Amino acid sequence: MTYQKNNNALSEITEVIFKDGMNGLDKAIAILVNETMQIERSRHLHAEPYERSQERQDYANGFKNKTFKTRIGELDLKIPQVRSCGFYPSFLEKGLRSERALTTAIAEMYVNGVSTRKVQNIIEQMCGFDVTSSDVSRASKLLDEELDKWRRRPLGCYKYLFLDARYEKIRYDNSVVDCAVLIAVGVNEQGKREILGVSVKLSEQEPNWRDFMQSLQARGLHGVELITSDAHAGLKAAKKAVFPSVKWQRCQFHLQQNAQSYVPKKALKEEVAFDIRSIFNAPSQTEAERLLKLTAQKYEKEAPKLANWMLDNLTEGFTFFNFPTGHWIKIRTSNVLERLNKEVKRRTRVVSIFPNVASCERLVSAILLEKSEEWQASDVYLNFS
């Protein structure tokens, strides 16, 4: 039966090309794609149409019409449906990712101040079809809806939580201000990284961080065993209020940067950095504490402020010792967010100044959604087995 259907589809494609030549290529491709999707549905069901089979997993449930814009024209597709809704053709899944990327590109150009005419020219060269000003407006609206849905999606159990903020210039109340972009990254029970949320606030003050953390909880975030971040006062106060029983790891990278402010001579900077790294690289917390005391004694005469600062602060970077050894290198810093912030900066610096908070949140969310999907498709970040 499949062979007969394939022959019929091939005959139909041949007839279209003979009749319309290259002008009928879009119709021919649509026939081919429709036939491929039906074959994929049959494989998903483990049965051909109307076939009785003990291996059958589900039942076909008609088709849903959808038009796709492509370089060769519009494809009128008939998307096969199944009763359980547990099937979606792989071709369309790839198409959706491409469509989302195109929508994001249009909206990003719009945010960046590119004129509608330039957007039209770029899309026409890229994809072979034109866009209108209403297309740009609709793309931005659709993107906003998708991004808002992503920002509000339900969460689950995440063992590790990383928090950080970066700043973007935004026009606000007739002036340009530096607004904080708060970002949360989690590692779930399968060891996968995921960007859990983003919010644009006027500052990193405690109420803003607290609202952000509470919004994560309201969406179902639970099971957090460790939070890694820098020592911003607002963040620390919010963490104490929202996650009082969760252990906190102060980012060792930030600690090493902070230490340099207490080094009295430039010639000492490299030596101090080496000594701090040696403490953090100790094989156990007991050994790290021993090295810390020795290092503080080493500098108590030459750099007493540094020695006191070390004793008061470096122990906040020892929490990671309470977790599996194989996780140490990735949970003791917020480097996962530092690298993410660099990617955000690379994409937002062309804007210079955002016209409003919404435009900043739109572009940053689009970048983070794209990155989070890349992470989900990649190998595990931490092994919990």
Image: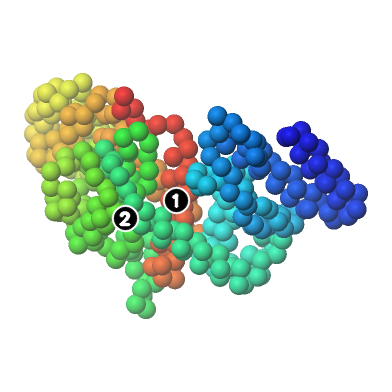
As displayed, is residue 285 above or below residue 44?
Answer: above
Q: What amino acid is at disc 1?
A: Leu
Q: Secondary structure at mark 2?
A: strand
- Within 10 Å of disc 2 (Cα), the crowding (few <14, some 14-19, many 20+) is many
Q: Which mark is residue 369?
A: 1
As rendered, which of 214 and 87 lies closer to the eye? 87
As displayed, is residue 305 above or below residue 117?
Answer: above
Residue 10 rendering spot, x and y as whole percentages: 81, 41
For this orientation, the residue located farthest to the bottom is 174
Q: Secondary structure at mark 1?
A: helix
Q: What amino acid is at disc 2?
A: Leu
- Residue at the spot 65% in from the left edge and 70% down from the top edge: 132
Q: Which mark is residue 13?
A: none
As displayed, is residue 183 above or below residue 292?
Answer: below
Q: Is residue 168 left or right of residue 114?
A: left
- Residue at the spot 47% in from the left edge and 38% down from the top edge: 377
Name the mark nearer the viewer: 1 or 2: 1
Q: Which residue is mark 2?
A: 182
For residue 303, say whether it is visible: no
Q: Is residue 68 left or right of residue 286?
A: right
As rendered, which of 19 and 247 lies closer to the eye? 19
Residue 214 rendering spot, x and y as whole percentages: 23, 56
Mark 1 / mark 2, whichever is N-terminal: 2
- Residue at the spot 50% in from the left edge and 67% down from the top edge: 141
Name the image quarter holding the N terminus.
Answer: top right
- Residue at the spot 15% in from the left edge and 26% down from the top edge: 285
As displayed, is residue 381 above or below residue 348?
Answer: above
Residue 249 rendering spot, x and y as whole percentages: 20, 39
Name the image quarter holding the C terminus.
Answer: top left
Quarter residue 275 falls in: top left
Measure the C-alpha gap from mark 1 to mark 2: 15 Å
Q: How is the image coloured?
A: rainbow
